[in-house]
Image (cartoon, grey):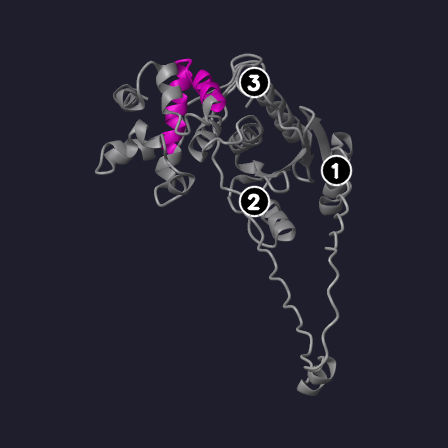
Amino acid sequence: MKRAHSFVLICGLALAPACTSPSRAPSRATEAPKPSATAVAMASPSSSEAPPAAPDATPTPSAAAPAPEAPPYDLEADRAARITTAKAELGAHISTAIVGDVFVLVGPPGFQGASFARSASLVRSSTEAYLNGRFDARPAQAITVYLFGDDARYQAFCKKKYSGPCISKYGFYQPSTRDMVMNAGLGLGTLTHELVHPFVETDFPDAPTWINEGIASVFEAPVLPRKGEIHGAKNWRLPRLLQAMRSAEKPKARLDRLFGMSDTTFRGDDEDLHYALARYVCQWLDERGKLWPFYRKWRDTVRDDPTGERAFAEVAEMTPTAAHALFAKWVVRL
């Protein structure tokens, strides 16, 4: 994520996974009525009559008509359509801005003027930094970013658009519709977190959840010392990790536990700890200049190295198991 060109620090909070809507059950087929026994007897040849010989020729199945090709994606038309949709949802007097070609920022009444301008600047500086030696590919399709200045408007929008409450009090990204919905009144850390996800989806589609959320969570407290640079500062997730390291949960707080962790396990009962662990492993690697070399190495070799252990060992010059002691010492000194 990015910030202003001078040193900037923003602390924020993380968010929740997107939801899916249930599909509708197919309707039952209607059975044709069965013919009566009399009708069957009348239609059947008698035993003295030989049925006509079947022709030798085998009928040739007709070729299915080719499906029409989908028209090529039109980014400009998609952006315009998203602005039209936002005006229909929130009224004609919204503020809008296009940032980084694909991000369509929407500021409804209550989040305009200086607040909207600061948000646009943050999106611009953070996305520039994400593409400066970090991610190689940018999202290819437009993404709407709704910015609400207070909880009441934020929750009302979710109820109207999604027929239910917002899935996080801070904000969320909905990949299926390419929408981000932010409760910006609580701060912009969730915005810089959520902006990471479409980059990971595009650049590393096979990325496990732990590295996706770990990188995103680093930028909940973004530090932007200069143009094109972004790092993360200590944030509110640290106490949860320290608590685990100092208790019976200590085995769960090991760096090497992440490697091979399934997405289901990551989002299980210890999700808050997994977020904290992944976040600080990524921050530790970033401070050592190893995060992005590791990320790219794993991305490029994921088919042969699905857990990322070999990529980590090559870049960090130690195994995840060996690295844990150094990582743990760093954490307790924060």
Q: Disc 1 to disc 2, how far (Cα)?
A: 22 Å
- Horizontally, residue 273 falls left or right of residue 110, namely left
Task: Give the percent coordinates (x, y) of residue 228.
Answer: 57, 14
Residue located beneath label 3 in the image: 129
Image coordinates of residue 27 in percent, x first then y, are 64, 66
Note whether residue 191 is visible.
yes
SS label for mark 3: helix
Residue that mark 2 sits on: 151
- Quadrant where the N terminus lies? top right
Query: Gap in Å between the C-alphas at discs 3 and 1?
Result: 26 Å
Q: Residues within 10 Å of mark 2 (few under 14, many from 20)?
A: some
Circle 1 sits in a helix, a strand or a loop, which is it?
Answer: helix
Magenta part of the chain = 276-300
**Amino acid type shown at disc 2:** Asp
> Relative to the observer, which residue lies in front, 313 or 331?
313
> Any magenta on residue 282?
yes
Q: Which residue is mark 1?
A: 83
Q: Nearer the viewer, residue 241 or 69?
A: 69
Q: Rounded to the nearest whole Å, what is the CA distance between mark 3 and mark 2? A: 29 Å
Q: Which residue is drawn at the image coordinates 73% and 64% (left, top)?
A: 54
**Label 1 is placed on what type of residue?**
Ile
Name which of mark 1 and mark 2 comes first in the sequence: 1
Q: Residue at x 73, y 38 (%)?
A: 82
Determine the secondary structure under disc 2: helix
Query: Does residue 8 show up magenta in the picture?
Result: no
Kindly identify the amino acid type of the residue bearing the numbered disc 3. Ala
State which quadrant residue 73 falls in: top right
Q: Earlier in the sequence, mark 3 or mark 1?
A: 1
Quadrant (top left/top right/bottom left/bottom right) for the C terminus: top left
